[in-house]
Amino acid sequence: MKKTFFILFPVCFFLLVSCASYRLEKKLSPVNKEFLSKVRYIITRQERKIFLNLLPSDRKSFIEEFWEKRDPDPDTEINEFREEYFELIEEANLLFKEGSTPGWLQERGRVYITLGPPDNRETYPRGMSLYGKPMEIWYYGFFPVVFIDDNWTGSYKLEPLSAQHISAINKTQVDSRPEVSKQKVVFDFHLNIKKVKEGEALFQVEIPYKNIWFAVKENLLQTILEVSVEVLDQAEKKVWQHQENYVISLTEKNLEELIGKNYLIEVSANINPGNYILAVEIGNNTGGERVRKRAKFTV
């Protein structure tokens, strides 16, 4: 009996560690680099990974969907969130011209864009005392956010008053983002059942390589798949089963060559003539997801 199992597992992206993500980001076109840079304060970690691992031809659709998901009123022609976000970037560039870094990339710019303009902004360009340093105190309600220019260069740094204080700022920045529903990945694959000869069936599964999740280990893209193939009779009683874990290991170059192609799984089973149900389930350890598919067949 010939048994060959392998990859089924979805989401059109691969889970990569930061070093691999950096290499992928360097390969982006100028337009896509600009997009990823500008949305740095609002893009989720999952969205960033998806974007980096998409085929270049799919990135334009991703960008359109990225803003659509954040549109507070889809019935209007203007995406209010997108307009306001870029207006805040422009305002930050105008307000924080000191230093060598564009205003929106400074720490004051980050807070201004993510939390919005403060209710009250106190500036002390020569410090609050004789030997003080340039300082700003922003108030959001009664909550203070302090920035200090330690080197008198115009580069103000966020000065947390305590660990709890910086934690509260970070949490507020995250909470201020518009709620984006988590993408529900639809896992799917093609399942074919062929009768080889009397009493023997061949099960074929085709999975697009782009739907497999990988992690980077020792400069290789790897994942472990938990594969289960069951044959049930009409009473849902199990009459045949095969289970095994499989390790997949590829280089980035291998994966680039395989994108757009399918991985073929072939499993043969000796079964008595009759009507049956095939149940295939595959789990991807990298993403922690599982998918199951059933089909009726006759031997």
Image (cartoon, grey):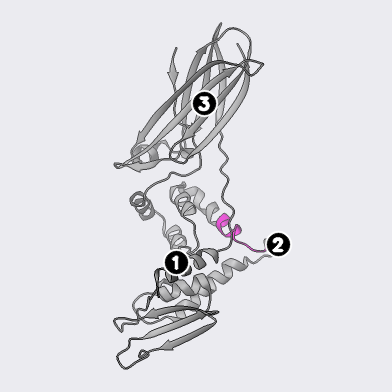
**Residue 172 within the segment the image draws in magenta:** no
Q: Which residue is mark 1?
A: 167
Task: Mark yes or no: residue 67 visible.
Answer: yes
- The residue tagged 3 is 205
Q: Is residue 234 above or below residue 44?
A: above
Tell me which numbered mark, 3 or 1, is placed earlier along the sequence: 1
| Mark 2: amino acid | Asp
Residue 89 at least partly seen: no
Q: Return the residue nearer the eye: 144 or 70.
A: 144
In this view, the residue in front, 169 or 97, is: 169
Which quadrant is the N terminus positioned in?
Answer: top left
Residue 22 point in image, percent of width and height: 35, 54
Q: Position of residue 75 (x, y in %)?
A: 70, 62
Q: Is residue 108 above or below residue 127?
A: above
Query: Looking at the rendering, in which quadrant would you find the C terminus?
Result: top right
What amino acid is labelled 1 in the image?
Answer: Ser
Closer to the eye: label 2 or 1: 1
Q: Secondary structure at mark 3?
A: strand
How packed is label 2: few (under 14 Cα within 10 Å), some, or many (20 or more)?
few
The CA distance from mark 2 to mark 3 is 42 Å
Whole-angstrom CA distance, mark 3 to mark 1, is 48 Å
How dense is the environment of label 3, judged by Cα within 10 Å: few (below 14), some, or many (20 and up)? Answer: many
| Residue 129 marker | none
Residue 276 is situated, as x and y percent measured from the top left of the image, at 62, 15
For the point 62% across and 62% down, the residue is 71
Residue with the most extreme right position: 75
Rendered residue at 52%/84% (across/down): 120
Label 1 Cα crowd, 10 Å radius (few <14 / some 14-19 / many 20+)? few
- Identify whether 251 is placed above or below 63: above
Residue annotated with mark 2:
75
Disc on the earlier residue, 2 or 3: 2
Report the magenta residues as a range: 64-73
